[in-house]
Image (spheres, rainbow, N blue to C red):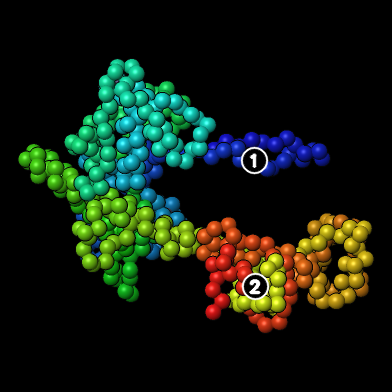
Amino acid sequence: MRTSKTPDCCCGHPKQTMSLKSVNFSILNAGEIRAASVCEVFEKRTADKGIPLKNGLRDPRMGPAQGICVTCGLRQGACHGHFGHIELCEPFYHISWALSVVHWLKLTCKDCGFFMGKKIDVDCARSRYLQTLVKKLHSKCPSCEQKPSKYSWSRDTQQITANGEKYDTSDVLAHLNKIHASTLKKLKMSHPTNMLLEVIPVPPPNVRPAIMAGDAVRSEDDLTYRLLQVIRSNAKLKNLKDDSRPSHIIASAREATQMAISGYFNHRKVGSAKKRSSTREYASVASRLTQKEGRMRGNLMGKRCDFTARSVITGDDTLSMKEVGVPISVAKKLTIPVKVTDYNRASLQELLDGDSVKFVVRPNGSRVDLSFINKATIKLDTGYTVERCLRDGDIVLFNRQPSLHKMSLMAHEVRVLPYSTFRMNLSCTTPYNADCK
Ligand SMILES: [Zn+2]
Ligand SMILES: [Zn+2]
């Protein structure tokens, strides 16, 4: 993040404002995840006889269930929680970056690490940048003339394949490590090996609170179960490797661990739909963000805001197509700010006598609420702003969700009408996809 200081203002006061120039995003590498972590999590159970286990998923260092936090000293509720981490016994794919890893493999010569894209266009749109680069590739390496393999991501086995054969994670890492530092610098991108996970950050328990019945834990959150699956399968794989068991047994344990990790991040991207059981699946990190009930659409996206009204629509053949009928109750609430000029001062002053002006804003910014003041004392002058109610002829934006195309939001002239519904000419139903039955 870069900030720049604006020069002192004319009256000599140092200006406090800092302007934001740009924000850079990059991928956390394993070292950064470990540095931000307060504890390693490896216990296969969360609690023993009701007491959270040390190095378990409810380790008190990640944030207290009650009382004071041992890490930051704040009480439960004030402490925001602290991340832990799980050490994986070997690198695994992050399901959301698997395709990016495939793109990087395509963009890098396996033998000499030469950049296989035909051009590096730094100015092109940053979103889907890799997809753009991957579209124009050399058919063989310009440096060593090696023909590139065909890489793809297998959703069923959660593995990368090269020419249809399984491409081991260790080979993928060796391949990606050949990328020239100058290429990454030119592209201004994080090193693609960071897209493979050596360490998984464990969110604090207040992100995934246990379901309590009185003082006892009745059930854990879905994410806790997902993380438990990761810890268990990772520990099993580690044991098998330590015991030097046959390779096919290790391979199937490795696949199970990859499935558990992918399932933790985004369970909808794992395996084919047929394989899924009919029982309810545990939610994953991605399902907290996406879909209608997710954080974005469910909590963050605006539902209502100032200077808007919402009601039922009905048809009205007495309105023209450019008009929208607005209920009196709405017109009395919504206001439009009008700047006082030499031309409209007299008419606005006259308007003050009625009850259609709610506020007057003086040039110094102070707002006068006219419901608490003797209106006769106010003398409008140029530079004042009058906030008056809606009236016939005002232009407003009229919208009907789900707003699938731009004609779902159009400008109309207001006509204030009795009753409580918005009225529109029936010829306008098509663009809004409305049906006035
Ligand atoms: Zn704390
Ligand atoms: Zn090459």
Q: Is residue 194 left or right of residue 9?
A: left
Q: Is residue 97 left or right of residue 240?
A: right
In the image, is residue 94 above or below residue 372?
above
Residue at (77% x, 39% y) in the render:
9
Q: How many marks?
A: 2
In the image, is residue 167 above or below residue 320?
above
The amino acid type found where label 1 is placed reads Ser
Location of residue 167 in the rendering, given as x and y in whole percent from the top left corner: 21, 35
In the image, is residue 54 above or below residue 87?
below
Mark 2 and mark 1: span between their CA atoms? 45 Å
Q: Is residue 264 visible?
A: no
Location of residue 223 in the rendering, given as x and y in whole percent from the top left corner: 31, 58
The amino acid type found where label 2 is placed reads Met
**Which is closer to the viewer, label 2 or label 1?**
2
Q: Residue at label 1?
A: 19
Lower position in the chain sequence, tag 2 or tag 1: 1
Q: Is residue 274 left or right of residue 1?
A: left
Which of the numbered marks, if any, corresponds to residue 424? Answer: 2
Q: Is residue 1 visible?
A: yes
In what element is the residue under mark 1?
A: strand
Judge the density around disc 1: few (<14), some (14-19), many (≥20) Cα neighbours within 10 Å.
few
Residue at (31% x, 27% y) in the render:
177
